[in-house]
Image: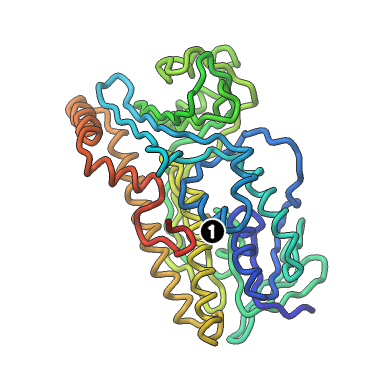
Amino acid sequence: MQNLDITIVGGGSAGLTLALLLAPLGLQIAVVEQGAAPTSAELNYQRVSALNPASMRLLNHLGVADPTMAQAAAYSSMAVWEADSFGRIEFSADPPQLPQLGWICDNEGIRQQLYQQLQTHNNVQCFFQAKISQLAQTEREVLVQLASGDILLSQLLVGADGVNSFVRQQQQLPLTHWDYQQQAIVARIHCQEPHQGVARQVFLPTGPLALLPLPDAQQCSIVWSADTARAEQLLALDNNAFNQALSAASQSALGCLTLTSERHAFPLTMRYASEWVRGRVVLVADAAHSIHPLAGQGMNLGLMDVAALAQIIEKQLQSGKALAEPRALLAYQRWRKAEAQSMIGTMEAFKRGFSNKQPALKLLRGAGLLLADKLPGLKQKLMAAALGNSGDLPDIAKY
């Protein structure tokens, strides 16, 4: 039996980042992950995330941003448009104050760098390929028993174990969810024309297609979110037919596009836990919320969750208070729920707005994109949101 301060369930980017944030505080921490430990295997850029400057400031503080950026593709411009419409909006970086708008990073690459840095802290134990057989809490502690027989007792347990969170289910925290009735097809592609460090997204009648630049100037990662029936049609195509469909959908923005990896698809569902705290158990990142990938903000939202929780825990300790004090945990819940609700609402408005095929609304959307592109004040607000510089940021992620 081990007595700890904090047990983090989930060894993805959110869980490892939280452990790294808390390790310098001298806390005894355990990370429990049902999957394997990150390895130094070559990155395949099959599943990627767009990290904004706020997230990179956080990673830089943890000492992992530089190696992460070495494996990432920085993009200095974004272009968003609607197919068969005049509507278009573009954003560009403004060196030297803002040299980049964001970075496209391999999800496993981020995890590798976090884990490598975490291994320098001897007050953090990691249990990989570990299954939880029992999870229970009392007023004073949380008990986690692993299938291996190990028993972990801690003051606080954090559920960072993804959209199908075991912690959330075990604690019976209520969940609101709805099916977007879309699937996201992800793959790596070769582009006939160099991407020039531009992240592109075109809104199609059946869903958005994102072309995300990779370190190779003629390689991109795609995230093609399509209505389920259309997605199934696309997945049934052979590679040549899919390449043709993809090139047509992108309106040849980068010339002919060719698959260089297998296609993978996953269903899109919005999930939102109406309670993030129960006693000494708290949820973060995808365990608490998941959103549509159309703006690429899922990873960023989760990283800000763990930064906010770490900030609150640090202030508790500095004040000589208990790290799992109910008032502090509820303050975290209020803070981050408000930010998640705002992001979920925005994504839902975008999805519904661009899903409507009525000609009159299509005309209005086109006019709206052009207007947003021409009005400096509105464009700056949209850009601040994309950069992660809006909302109530944790201190570590601020300028």
Residue that lies at the very extreme toward the front in this rendered image: 96
Q: Position of residue 331 (x, y in %)?
A: 42, 74
Q: Position of residue 292 (x, y in %)?
A: 43, 43
Q: Residues within 10 Å of mark 1 (few under 14, many from 20)?
A: many
- Position of residue 302 in the picture relative to residue 124 (left or right): left
Residue on which the image places disc 1: 287
Residue 321 sits above or below residue 55 on the image: below
What residue is at 77 percent from the left and 56 percent from the top? 129
Quadrant where the image shows the N terminus: bottom right
Residues 89 and 153: in front is 89
What residue is at 44 percent from the left and 34 percent from the top? 76
Examine the image and state in which quarter residue 22 appears: bottom right
Question: How many numbered marks are there?
Answer: 1
What residue is at 63 percent from the left and 39 percent from the top? 70
- Indicate the colouring scheme: rainbow
At mark 1, the secondary structure is helix
What residue is at 53 percent from the left and 65 percent from the top? 283
Quadrant where the image shows the C terminus: bottom left
Q: Position of residue 40 (x, y in %)?
A: 76, 43
Residue 116 sits above or below residue 147 on the image: above
Q: Amino acid at mark 1?
A: Ala
Residue that lies at the very extreme toward the right in this rendered image: 148
Q: Position of residue 103 (x, y in %)?
A: 52, 39
